[in-house]
């Protein structure tokens, strides 16, 4: 094929177009799934009524910005949509995006296909930090209703403590990754060791906790997006957006690292700085999500591999594609968790574990066969 100066080959244009269309299709599917997710539950709401409630409610809230003295006249449907189901659905999307983008970044930074906040022990480190905050610093409070059983009285302090312990686990992972000849299996075993260590620490704290603290920590460890308030959702969304933009901005650096450290250095990439900062950002994402929602496993592992199967390894499309897939997977899991044993609501972390464990075993076996 003759390649003229400044002319992009037709085949490459089609190659890029397919990837972009896939991502755009995922965004459309996510929007439709959001409507469906809000419509199902103990009280079924037709999808068209959900759409009208979201549309009219958005207009009313925009009008309130220009008329602060006004009030919102909410129907029973609007209360269910805006006060219960919409925050839960958006929390699932935000958490799925955050965990997935952290996972795809870790897999690239560490050149380890089994890397994710959960498999490397970072989520469990954050869970231990949150338990320290709840039990020792008193930031967790028990409430009387099942939907509001645990609330964080100081979410900022809880996130900071969780982030500190996530950083400790991240530092260990980075040190191990720099040992020459370290294989993905060794990294996973290190993650298992870290997970066991921080789980033991959490159990130690629970042993000395009183009944109220113990109930708060046990209930909190069930990864569930239904406990997020609008305030907590705003914090998670801000951190997730900032972290995702950082990873997207470094997409070319990650492409270079995928080709090997020496190749990346030859292209002018500061590999150590990119690796360290990227792991810190991934740890921050994990800490924020864990401190608000509990431990939700395997999303950061499964979604990047699903997207790789569909659109390849190019980080320009893999990172945004993983964000879309993470939102889709966790929102779909949360929707199923709300209806599978209705009227009871199953924590979404249970379904993600059932989905992620077989994929994790498959990836391990495939690695050993190679």
Image (tube, helix red, strand yellow):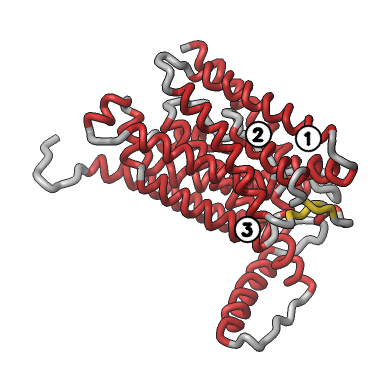
Where, by quadrant of the figure, is residue 90 drawn? bottom right
Determine the CA span between mark 2 and mark 1.
Answer: 14 Å
Residue placed under numbered mark 2 in the picture: 124
Residue drawn at the location 74% of the way across and 51% of the way down: 139
Observer-side mark, 2 or 3, equals 2
Q: Is residue 165 above or below residue 176?
A: below
**Residue at coordinates 50% horizontally, 46% vertically from top-left?**
323
Residue located beneath label 3 in the image: 233
Dot placed on the residue nearer the N-terminal end, 2 or 1: 2
Q: Mark on residue 187?
A: none
Residues marked 2 and 3 touching at CB (< 8 Å):
no
Local crowd size for mark 2, using a 10 Å CA cut-off: few (<14), some (14–19), many (≥20)? many
Which residue carries the number 1 mark?
205
Relative image position of residue 222 (x, y in whole percent): 75, 41
Asked which secondary structure carries label 3, the reply is helix
Q: Nearer the viewer, mark 2 or mark 1?
A: 1
Question: Who comes first in sequence, dot 3 or dot 1?
Answer: 1
């Amino acid at each position: 094929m003759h390649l003229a100066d400044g002319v992009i080959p037709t085949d490459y244009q089609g190659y890029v177009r397919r990837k972009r269309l896939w991502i755009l299709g995922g965004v459309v599917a996510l929007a439709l799934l959001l409507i469906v997710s809000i419509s199902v539950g103990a009280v079924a709401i037709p999808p068209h009524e959900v759409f009208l409630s979201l549309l009219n409610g958005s207009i009313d809230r925009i009008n309130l910005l220009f008329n602060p003295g006004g009030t919102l006249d909410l129907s029973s449907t609007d209360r269910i949509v805006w006060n219960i189901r919409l925050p839960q659905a958006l929390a699932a999307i935000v958490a799925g995006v955050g965990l997935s983008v952290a996972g795809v970044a870790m897999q690239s930074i560490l050149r380890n296909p089994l890397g994710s906040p959960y498999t490397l022990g970072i989520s469990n480190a954050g869970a231990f930090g949150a338990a320290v905050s709840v039990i020792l610093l008193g930031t967790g409070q028990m409430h009387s209703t099942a939907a509001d059983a645990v609330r964080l009285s100081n979410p900022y302090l809880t996130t900071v403590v969780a982030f500190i312990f996530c950083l400790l686990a991240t530092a260990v992972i980075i040190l191990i990754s720099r040992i020459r000849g370290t294989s993905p299996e060794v990294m996973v075993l290190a993650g298992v060791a870290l997970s066991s260590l921080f789980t033991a620490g959490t159990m130690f704290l629970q042993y000395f906790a009183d009944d109220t603290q113990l109930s708060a920590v046990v209930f909190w460890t069930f990864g569930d997006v239904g406990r997020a308030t609008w305030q907590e959702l705003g914090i998670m969304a801000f951190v997730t957006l900032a972290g995702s933009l950082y990873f997207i901005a470094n997409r070319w650096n990650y492409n270079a690292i995928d080709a090997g450290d020496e190749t990346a250095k030859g292209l002018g990439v500061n590999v150590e700085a990119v690796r360290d900062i990227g792991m810190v950002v991934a740890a921050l994402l994990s800490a924020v999500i864990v401190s608000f929602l509990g431990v939700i496993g395997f999303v950061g592992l499964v979604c990047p591999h699903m997207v790789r199967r569909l659109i390849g390894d190019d980080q320009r499309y893999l990172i945004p594609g993983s964000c879309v897939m993470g939102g889709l997977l966790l929102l779909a899991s949360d929707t199923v968790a709300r209806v599978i044993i209705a009227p009871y609501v199953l924590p979404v972390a249970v379904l993600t574990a059932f989905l992620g464990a077989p994929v994790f075993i498959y990836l391990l076996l495939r690695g050993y066969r190679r």
